[in-house]
């Protein structure tokens, strides 16, 4: 298995086992590298980078709360305290080296600001706690709320773009943007960061002056929220209702026209109306970042740009110090909170007392377009501890339209099972595609290693005198094939065991082609080829046995007569009714034993003369 390795939490763009050899239905998923690669996350090798951009506009000097003594606190003072607590929460003292990572920070935090202009004062890195606290304490509010400046800093951050670790932007603002232009620039740059560099952005509104509508639009543009078209207030955020603000028309090089967004309903931003709420929101965001994992979705994936809506089509596994290796984390199911517990007990043999700690735990999609997954709180704690050091994610192979009818394509010259075939088993269908002939043409769509293929419903069988090309060689009821060897030593690759033929007499007309007899069904054969679905059976030649029994019961509709050796037989042509095709140069040169000729006397005389002439030609 080829493993594509990413260091911890390499989040990718958000918006944008066993191979199956039998019919695969919706609940069957094949996790194979040919469809989507396994991404291996070494959860202690590279912490994510988070760049916090703080609003430094003049309104941040306004009162945002009070301390325990009743003294008024500015919003800037509250924000300073929250950011200090944030950096303290992720900081770890001690060494951070390839050999000893015990002192590596959980998240590498950086700090920037915006007002009328913007800047980044502390780059995301290891042990930035002291620098960030001293820097944020120096910030003094002034200027406007030109949030587009902050979005541009996130987009242009080389630290957030690196492929070595995940990059996250955190935008904190306390008021409405200073005009439409900066709002449209914000949407443009957050979309560009997400789509060009797989950088996600969280939007956090702080204080009663923040604009939740605009911040929710920013969260959706940054890939951490979602919007739906909501002109009449009926939005329920179902997948078919979602719209991507990044697809809004462009107004300028760095602006998206958000006029149409007035009909959107968006969600995803955090709203903190107190200092404690701001601290809680920021700590919650960092927990989400630390336990979010990407799904590697190839461009040609069926459900691109994200995973399938069915969570069973996504695999999340980790190696656990107590539970064991290759633990399949179950997707959260509101109707079954015991899903992960049941898996641990019933499939992995974990003691119920131990598994009980994981009731209600699992994973869910972290973004609206299913490009990332996130673990629940307890599992997140396990990942951040030494209990879990490796986590894998993978999207399953998917096939659409599985189980539908199709025409089996003609792959090669031996596709009918005969070694001496020269391509006569192929014909052109109504779509000008080269397909199999006879009873081997009707097929069913099957999902094999993530690729839709048309597999035959029925394989080649010995020709019955029934007006159907049973052996799929391109000829109807031809006399050019030998009687099958019931011992299994026959050179022909018939479908299934032919011992079932014991109940039928080869010499009474049903199998006249094996005696160099010509089969004639006139205009009323007992069967025409049925392309309608037939229930699959454990008996591989189920449909052919039905033909056998039906043709045996209606022998009077088809009869056999002696035939000349066939030299130049022509296959049935596309669109021609196989049941009445008599294009083969068959002839009755003498009456078959115990049978009346099935062709008119005048034609028999002509064909007899033709046979005599051919034999004379061969002597010269």
Image (tube, grey):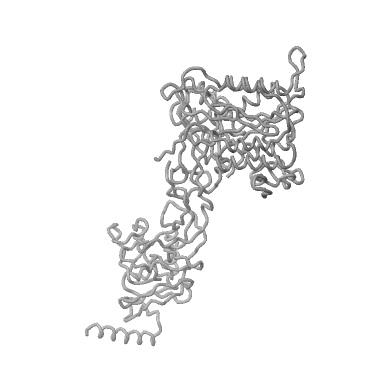
Relative to 88, is 238 above or below? below
User: Which quarter of the rendering shows the N terminus?
Assistant: top left
Tell how many labels: 0
Q: Is residue 141 above or below residue 180?
A: above
Q: Estimate the x, y position of residue 36 in percent, counting from the top left.
A: 47, 43
Name of the residue lying farthest toward the left: 620
Q: Position of residue 359 (x, y in %)?
A: 56, 26
Q: Nearer the viewer, residue 252 or 264?
A: 252
Residue drawn at x 67%, y 49% as measured from the top left: 250
Name the residue rendered at 51%, 58% in the picture: 405
Residue 90 at least partly seen: yes
Q: Is residue 184 left or right of residue 484?
A: right
- Dividing the picture into quadrants, the one containing residue 546 is bottom left
Q: Position of residue 139 (x, y in %)?
A: 67, 24
Quick one: quadrant of the C terminus? Answer: bottom left
Q: Quadrant of residue 58?
A: top right
Q: Is residue 424 above or below residue 160?
A: below
């Amino acid at each position: 298995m080829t493993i594509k390795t990413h260091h911890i939490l390499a989040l990718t763009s958000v918006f944008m086992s066993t191979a199956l050899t039998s019919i695969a239905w919706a609940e069957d998923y094949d996790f194979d590298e040919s469809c989507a690669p396994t991404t291996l996350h070494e959860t202690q090798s590279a912490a994510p980078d988070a760049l916090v951009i703080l609003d430094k506009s003049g309104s941040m000097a306004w009162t945002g709360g009070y301390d325990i003594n009743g003294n008024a606190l500015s919003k800037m003072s509250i924000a300073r305290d929250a950011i200090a607590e944030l950096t303290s929460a992720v900081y770890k003292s001690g060494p951070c080296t390839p050999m000893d990572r015990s002192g590596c920070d959980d998240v590498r935090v950086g700090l920037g600001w915006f007002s009328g202009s913007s800047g980044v004062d502390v780059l995301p890195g290891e042990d930035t706690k002291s620098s960030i606290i001293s820097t944020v304490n120096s910030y003094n509010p002034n200027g406007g709320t030109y949030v587009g400046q902050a979005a541009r800093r996130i987009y242009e951050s080389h630290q957030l773009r690196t492929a070595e670790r995940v990059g996250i932007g955190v935008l904190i603002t306390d008021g409405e943007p200073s005009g439409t232009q900066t709002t449209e620039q914000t949407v443009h740059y957050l979309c560009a960061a997400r789509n060009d560099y797989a950088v996600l952005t969280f939007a956090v509104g702080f204080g009663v002056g923040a604009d939740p509508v605009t911040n929710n639009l920013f969260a959706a543009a940054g890939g951490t929220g979602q919007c739906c078209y909501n002109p009449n207030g009926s939005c329920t955020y179902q997948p078919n209702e979602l719209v991507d603000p990044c697809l809004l028309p462009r107004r300028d090089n760095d602006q998206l026209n958000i006029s149409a967004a007035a009909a959107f309903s968006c969600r995803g931003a955090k709203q903190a109306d107190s200092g404690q709420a701001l601290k809680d929101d920021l700590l919650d965001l960092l927990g989400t970042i630390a336990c979010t994992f990407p799904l590697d979705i190839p461009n040609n994936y069926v459900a691109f740009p994200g995973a399938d809506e069915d969570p069973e089509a996504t695999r999340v596994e980790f190696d656990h110090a107590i539970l064991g290796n290759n633990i399949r984390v179950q997707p959260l199911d509101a109707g079954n909170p015991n899903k992960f517990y049941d898996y641990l007990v019933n499939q992995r043999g974990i003691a119920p007392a131990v598994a009980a700690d994981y009731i209600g735990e699992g994973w869910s999609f972290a973004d609206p377009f299913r490009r990332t997954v996130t673990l629940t709180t307890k599992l997140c704690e396990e990942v951040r501890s030494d209990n879990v050091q490796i986590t894998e994610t993978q999207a399953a192979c998917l096939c659409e339209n599985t189980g539908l009818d199709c025409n089996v394509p003609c792959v090669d010259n031996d596709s009918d099972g005969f070694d001496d075939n020269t391509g006569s088993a192929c014909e052109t269908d109504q779509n000008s595609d080269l397909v199999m002939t006879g009873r081997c043409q009707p097929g069913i769509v099957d999902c094999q290693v993530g690729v839709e293929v048309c597999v035959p419903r029925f394989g080649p069988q010995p020709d019955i005198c029934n007006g159907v090309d049973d052996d799929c060689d391109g000829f109807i009821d031809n006399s050019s094939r030998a009687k099958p060897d019931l011992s299994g030593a026959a050179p022909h690759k018939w479908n299934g065991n032919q011992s079932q033929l014991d109940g039928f007499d080869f010499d009474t007309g049903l199998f006249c082609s094996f005696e160099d007899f010509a089969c004639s069904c006139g205009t009323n054969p007992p069967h025409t080829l049925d392309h309608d679905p037939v229930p699959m059976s454990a008996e591989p030649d189920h449909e052919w046995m039905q033909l056998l029994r039906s043709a045996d019961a209606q022998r009077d509709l088809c009869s056999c007569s002696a035939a000349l050796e066939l030299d130049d037989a022509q296959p049935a042509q596309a669109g021609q009714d196989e049941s009445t095709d008599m294009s083969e140069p068959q002839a009755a040169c003498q009456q078959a034993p115990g049978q009346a000729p099935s062709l008119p006397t005048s034609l028999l005389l002509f064909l007899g003369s033709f046979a005599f002439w051919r034999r004379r030609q061969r002597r010269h």
